[in-house]
Image (cartoon, grey):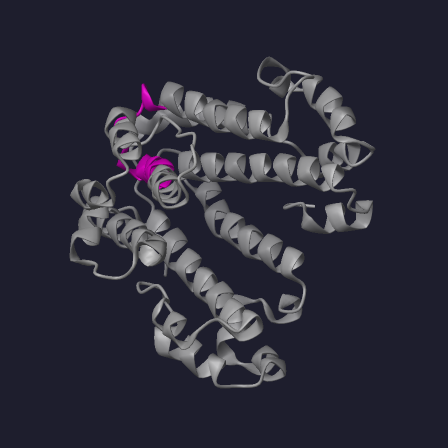
Amino acid sequence: MPVAFKENLDFATAVGKIRALSARLFTPADWERFLTAKTSKDLIRLLIETPYGRVISDTDSFDDIQYKLVYHLLSEMNEVEKILPEKEFLYYFRYKIDLGNIKKVLYGILSEKDVTLYGGGLISLEVLERIKNSRDLELLKDLPYPWDILEEIEEEPVLWTYYLEQAYFRGLIELSRENGYSLLESLLTRQIDLENLKIALRIKTVNYPDRYRAFFYSGGTIEVREYLRLLDANLEGWKDSEVVERLGMREYLDRPIILEKKMEESLVELLSVSKYTAFGYEPILDYFFRKEIEHKNILFIFSGLEYGLPIQTLRSGIRGL
């Protein structure tokens, strides 16, 4: 999909701030330095020497770091949001918080376990906590758009995650079209294509039940029927398929860690066109997406060190390296 930039001089101040923040994102040299860490404690010490030293402490566990990184991203987003002429494109991230919280509430009710929710979404934590504490699944169906898709769902609750994800994509694509967010729409449709390829691989390699064939996301540039055709073909033949070739994932189908990395890097590459606009939402969307990737890299290295993964495995999974 060709990108039509939404130039708006009112974004000038926010874009200036984002350019400054972008200069602080980690470089390949930084990631190589973090790979010298022998333990997760070593990694934390190295991170404390960076701007993350204001966020992370040397006593943090994986869960602590994950929690702090989410709020670090949200705090930056809140500051930038104050100087934006419009902010609906940031719902890409805000809805994601809501989606994660609803999944946690669902899991907490079904498993009868306690879960921790994140602030920063568009649905108030007070409402979500009330549902969590009441353990009433039906209350999830009363949550506002785009989650109201659950009102129509009769499937067993363990399958609701798919419908929530579909509502997330559908709602954001509609919002993108209403507001002229061409780049955001391109990001979403590419993401749907890639998620569908991952679903097809799981069905093919993990032997999921036939009913999972219905759980592909609509709204991508590749029709769902093309993925269904893949499921009827030998896995070795996938490398020569038009779908896999079009997504540029031909060489990575049998390497899950690298496949996941290449998929996210393809999304970063798509957003990189934002450098061609000086005044618009695009550089801001690009920055926060890359910031999320940076956080994923940190958590990937941390967990890899905790599990004793070899350095080559860690290097192969770092996005942008």
Q: Based on the displayed image, in which of its 4 quarters is residue 43 positioned?
A: top right
Residue 96 sits inside the magenta stretch: yes
What residue is drawn where x is 21% and y is 52%?
A: 150
What residue is drawn where x is 61% and y is 53%?
A: 261
Q: Is residue 223 visible?
A: no
Give the x, y percent position of residue 17. Answer: 45, 22
What's the magenta region?
81-98
Q: Does 309 sit left or right of 68 as displayed? A: right
Q: Say above or below: 154 vs 179.
A: below
Give the x, y percent position of residue 179. Answer: 22, 44
Q: Say above or below: 205 vs 4.
A: below
> Which quadrant would the N terminus be assigned to in this image?
bottom left
Q: Does 79 sit left or right of 171 as displayed? A: right
Give the x, y percent position of residue 310. Answer: 81, 47
Dominant secondary structure of the residues highlighted in magenta in the image: helix
What residue is drawn where x is 78% and y is 25%?
A: 42
Q: Say above or below: 121 vs 309.
A: above
Q: Say above or below: 216 vs 82.
A: below
What residue is drawn where x is 41% and y is 79%?
A: 228
